[in-house]
Image (cartoon, rainbow, N blue to C red):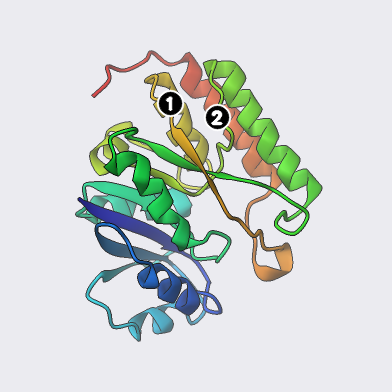
Amino acid sequence: MKLSILMPVYNEEERIADALKQALAVDYPCEIELVVVDDGSRDGTGEVLGRVDDQRLRVITHQRNAGKGAAIKTAVDNAEGEYMVILDADLEYDPQDIPKLLEPVLDGRAKVVYGNRTFGSHSAYSFWYVMGNKGVTTVANVLYNSYIGDLETCFKLMPLELYRSLEIRSRGFGMEAEVTGKLLRRRIRPYEVPISYRARGREEGKKITWKDGVEAVWILARERTRRRPATR
């Protein structure tokens, strides 16, 4: 199996070198490719990406910032693996956890795997961020009669063709809710494994806001009321 690791990047000059180094240093149980989409960065991100020499790395550049969802769509359109997982470049997630996500797939227990974050005082950005995340996840569980633990997790591993079939249209952070809503609408329940997490603050460049939480709830409700497509 080949795994496509998809990394959307926007103005991460200070972290992108470490993010790539960490992702490429993991001992994966399968072949991988790292597809990075520079989503119109206006700092030195592009220059840093141009200095990395690794055959597993491919860099695609957007001339203008289009949002996380749009960057992931570009990465998905260009990926060549059988499976995919998203890895942000902000160092909040540890790529050493990706092999843990692969285990249920490789041994036949699951097709879709989510990384479930455990929030603590040392890892949470703020009380309201954690409550907002839990609130959006609770809305999804009520609407879809499910019991997932972390809807907004970046670590969503699934077959590449399954993701393509979801036809995600959200261009920003709303893609997280749209992906989960469409999976649950198809009665695909993600397998969850615990992962480590360290949130960064506003001063470190954190971009998500309360408005993204409101959008996520709206997207979940919209997807719930749509006719369920045939499972592929």
Q: Quadrant of the C terminus?
A: top left
Q: Amino acid at mark 2?
A: Ile
Q: Position of residue 9 (x, y in %)?
A: 46, 65
Res 86 visible:
no
Which element is circle 1 on?
loop
Q: Total label count?
A: 2
Which element is circle 2 on?
loop
Q: How many neighbours does mark 1 have within 10 angstroms: few (below 14), some (14-19), or many (20 or more)?
A: some
In this figure, which residue is indicated by the disc labeled 1? Answer: 189
Q: Which mark is residue 148?
A: 2
Q: Position of residue 49 (x, y in %)?
A: 38, 79
Residue in the image at 29% along x and 55% along y: 4
Q: Which mark is residue 179?
A: none
Residue in the image at 77% along x and 52% along y: 126
Q: Position of residue 219 (x, y in %)?
A: 53, 29
Question: Of label 2 and label 1, which has the lower sequence position?
Answer: 2
Rendered view: 127 above or below 205: above
Res 223 visible:
yes
Q: Is residue 83 left or right of residue 221?
A: left
Residue in the image at 64% along x and 66% along y: 205
Q: Amino acid at mark 1?
A: Arg
Q: Are marks 2 and 1 in contact (CB under 8 Å)?
A: yes
Viewer-proximal residue among 152 and 45: 152
Q: How many neighbours does mark 2 have within 10 angstroms: few (below 14), some (14-19), or many (20 or more)?
A: some
